[in-house]
Each structure stands twice: as structure tokens, then as C-alpha cells.
Image (cartoon, helix red, strand yellow):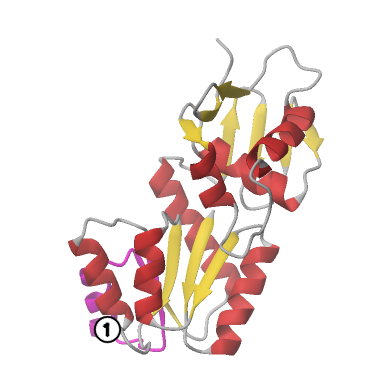
């Protein structure tokens, strides 16, 4: 998933970003509400983690503006405010979840996975396509019960394809979700990594899962 972190505590921001990237998420970060709003209006994120008390715009204002414009990006509020009224206000504003500081990173990661399950309609952390399985919690990928070793970037790309199986995804959309703003790669980076994945996922199997849609991009599905 591609995640936005908006937190004005620089140390906490950096810790969250580092841990999420270690979990193979593509992560962008900022330190005030106006930048968060700009990011969220420019990029289709899978989820965002917003502090409530931020400079320029607070988290509540950011979510209000997003929801008014029809932006339904899943949002977790991260805040020291822990009263029932604060939680109710945050959720009623349009946030999807609320996590009180100090918090466990494992809980934050679990809540992000839960929001993804809701967005994709998948009831568990395990995504399947015929004999291919991907566990979004353990990051274990298997085909025909044989574990497949992937690099961090290959895993992130496969997870995005699996979460959107049977959908045609443009190269631009794939790049926007799998790589963050800091990436400075070549223009054919998606094609290169699709080739890597095909060798590990499809090579040696009669049924192919990763398909090219000429002039558009790629689709992950069982070959008809």
C-alpha cells in the first residue's frame, strides 16, 4: 500500500515512516495539515495517518475538506486526545479509525491492514488467486504450496496487483501506488518489475496470472 504520514513531531514521524517502509509499504510524509491536504488531493493513497494537532490545518480540518470534495481515502487519526468526546468528534468528522498516543506500532499496522480489507472486500489478510496466496501480515507468498522469495519492491507490487485482481491497472497507477515521491527511477520501472515477478510467479506454470493489456497496463487474473 501507499501510505501518507502527517505528524508534526519529527522524531515520531521518522520512526513511523521507517517502520512502515520496513513492512514494505510505500510511504510519503509531511509535518503540517496543509501539506497533508495537498498530498492527499494529488495522489490516490491507500490510507493516511494524520495527527490531529498540526500547524496550518489540524487533522479535523484536513478530513473535513477531503470528505467535502468526495475524497474517501481511509484515514486513521493519531492523537494524544483520548476522551470519548474527542474520539466521537474525530470519527464523525469522517475518519475511519482513531489511535491514541502512545501506541503500539503493531496495532497501527494491524489497523491499516484492517482498513485495506474493508476497501478491497477481502475478509482476511490472505489474498488468493487460484493456487497463489499472499499473506499481508507475514508477507509470505506461495504458489502451489511452494514459498516464493521476493524482494521488498517485488512483494509490494504483487500485493497491489493481488488486491486489485481482475482489474486492469495502468502503468501510471501502478507506479503511483508502489513507488513514493522520493523514487528517481527509469520510465520503464513498472515493466522491469513485472518481468521480475513473471519469472518468479508464472514461469514453469501452465496457467499464467500476470497479463499485459496492450496500450494500457497489466491485469492479474486466471488466464481464460
Q: Residue at x 41, y 67 (%)?
A: 39
Q: Residue at x 36, y 90 (%)?
A: 55
- From what the image shows, is residue 100 above or below residue 144? below
Whether the magenta-drawn stretch holds residue 81 is answered as yes
Q: Is residue 96 left or right of residue 18?
A: left
Point out residue 83 in the picture as x, y percentages from the top left corner: 30, 87
Q: Residue at x 49, y 60 (%)?
A: 112
Point out residue 92 in the picture as x, y percentages from the top left corner: 21, 70
Other residues around mark 1 within 10 Å, as few (<14) / some (14–19) / many (≥20): some
Residue 139 visible in the snapshot: no
- From what the image shows, is residue 185 above or below residue 94? above
Point out residue 3 in the picture as x, y percentages from the top left corner: 51, 62
Picture quarter containing residue 67?
A: bottom left
Residue 173 visible in the snapshot: yes
Q: Which residues are magenta?
A: 75-97
Picture quarter containing residue 208?
A: top right
Q: Is residue 82 left or right of residue 136?
A: left
The residue singled out by tag 1 in the image is 86
- Residue nearest the viewer, comparing 129 with 17: 17
- From what the image shows, is residue 29 above or below residue 178? below
Point out residue 111 in the picture as x, y percentages from the top left corner: 48, 62
Amino acid at each position: 500500500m501507499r501510505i501518507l504520514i502527517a505528524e508534526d513531531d519529527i522524531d515520531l514521524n521518522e520512526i513511523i515512516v521507517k517502520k512502515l517502509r520496513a513492512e514494505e509499504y510505500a510511504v510519503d510524509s509531511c509535518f503540517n495539515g496543509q501539506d497533508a491536504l495537498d498530498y492527499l488531493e494529488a495522489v490516490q493513497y491507500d490510507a493516511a495517518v494524520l495527527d490531529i494537532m498540526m500547524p496550518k490545518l489540524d487533522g479535523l480540518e484536513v478530513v473535513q475538506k477531503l470528505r467535502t470534495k468526495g475524497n474517501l481515502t481511509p484515514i486513521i487519526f493519531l492523537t494524544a486526545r483520548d476522551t470519548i468526546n474527542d474520539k466521537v468528534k474525530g470519527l464523525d468528522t469522517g475518519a475511519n479509525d482513531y489511535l491514541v498516543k502512545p501506541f503500539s506500532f503493531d496495532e497501527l499496522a494491524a489497523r491499516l491492514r484492517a482498513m485495506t480489507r474493508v476497501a478491497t472486500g477481502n475478509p482476511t489478510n490472505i489474498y488468493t488467486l487460484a493456487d497463489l496466496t499472499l499473506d499481508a501480515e507475514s508477507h509470505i507468498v506461495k504458489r502451489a504450496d511452494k514459498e516464493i522469495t521476493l524482494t521488498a519492491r517485488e512483494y509490494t507490487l504483487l500485493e497491489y496487483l493481488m488486491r486489485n485482481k481482475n482489474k486492469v491497472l495502468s502503468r501510471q497507477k501502478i507506479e503511483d501506488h508502489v513507488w513514493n515521491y522520493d523514487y528517481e527511477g527509469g520510465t520503464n520501472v513498472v515493466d522491469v518489475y513485472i518481468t521480475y515477478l513473471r519469472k518468479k510467479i508464472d514461469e514453469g506454470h501452465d496457467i499464467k496470472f500476470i497479463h499485459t493489456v496492450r496500450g494500457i497496463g497489466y491485469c492479474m487474473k486466471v488466464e481464460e
